[in-house]
Image (spheres, helix red, strand yellow):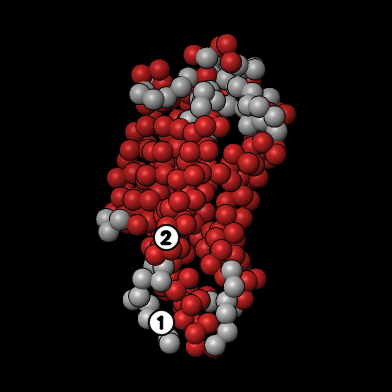
Amino acid sequence: MRRSLRTPLGVPVTGVLLGAALVAWIVTVERMRGMDAGPGTDLGALGWFLGVWVTMMAAMMLPSAAPMVLVVHRVSGERADRDSAPAPGSTWMFVAGYLASWTAYGLAAYGAYRAVTAADPGFIAWDREGPLVAGAAIAAAGLYQLTPLKQVCLRHCRTPLHFVMHRWRDGGAGAFAMGLEHGLWCLGCCWGLMLVLFALGVMSITWMAAVAALVFAEKVLPVGERLSAAAAVCLIGLGTWIAVAPGSVPGFTEPASMPAMQMGVGTVAPPV
């Protein structure tokens, strides 16, 4: 019997996605507890960082990606019924492709971090121009919220059926490619918010939760598109605040405030 898109066949998938996100949050909180050293937090060895980063992305991004994953799952089921052929793993191959795109972002960020560390420019030290650099990065992310590219990418993320119906690819490899493509659109929407996380302290549970909440609100809530401008104002204001008076920002960890955990200026070494 052919299944309707209105049937609740996506309920188990929703449960798995949200359950995976919950587990990822629990693991992330456990692994990152006490690791927040603010801007300049040491990212550790590549393998350790990638493990933490992928877990973070699963925690932060899977809830907001759930509508797209559900559409892929339902359309995949419809096509399998129509063709009388199973579509094994298409949904999860899509999720794998989606996470692969965010893994690539993490690798790029890690490479940039290592390049800056190797160059060792003295002006980014927290007791010199560090607050200005961190504040400028956050303000720049706020300005990006107002760009046409941000709006185009956000609309893509908010209209999953349009993407699936126009960019559908059959098979597991096709589902992975779709997930990768959707992930790239998601990167276009959210890369600035992830830059904010790095600028505030990538190992901060507090700021991670705040960024994840904003990502979810923009992509899923009915007022999501209108939140971009409000978020832009808030980010520009936060960047200015950190540049001028970082010690007065609630929840913000100044690198110099944790001398016992530092290796160099404003860094903390995670386990390797």
Of residue 259 and residue 28, the one placed in the foreground of this image is 28
Query: Neighbour class for label 1 at 10 Å: few (<14), some, many (≥20)?
Result: some
The percent coordinates of residue 187 (x first, y second) are: 52, 54
- In the shown orientation, is residue 94 left or right of residue 223? right
The residue where tag 1 is placed is 3
Q: Secondary structure at mark 2?
A: helix
Contact flag, marks 2 and 1 (Cβ < 8 Å): no
Crowd band around label 2 with a 10 angstrom C-alpha radius: few (<14), some (14–19), many (20+) = some
Marks 2 and 1, Cα distance to the nearest angstrom? 18 Å
Residue 47 in the image, given as x and y percentages of width and height: 70, 39
The image shows residue 48, relative to residue 57, as above or below, that is above
Residue 26 appearing in the image: yes
Return the residue found at the far top.
260
Q: Is residue 109 visible?
A: no
Going by the numbered disc 2, the residue's amino acid type is Thr
Q: How many marks?
A: 2
**Quarter-wise, where is residue 232 in the image?**
top left
Foreground of the two, 48 or 117:
48
The front one of 64 and 12 is: 12
Q: Percent from the top left, x then y, of residue 110?
A: 65, 39
| Residue designated by label 2 | 14
Which residue appears farthest toward the right when viewing the image? 118
Residue 130: which numbered mark, if any?
none
Mark 2 or mark 1: which comes first in sequence? 1
Q: Residue at x 57, y 70 (%)?
A: 90
Q: Residue 94: percent from the left, percent from the top?
A: 56, 65
Q: Is residue 85 above or below residue 271?
A: below
In the image, residue 64 above or below residue 76: above
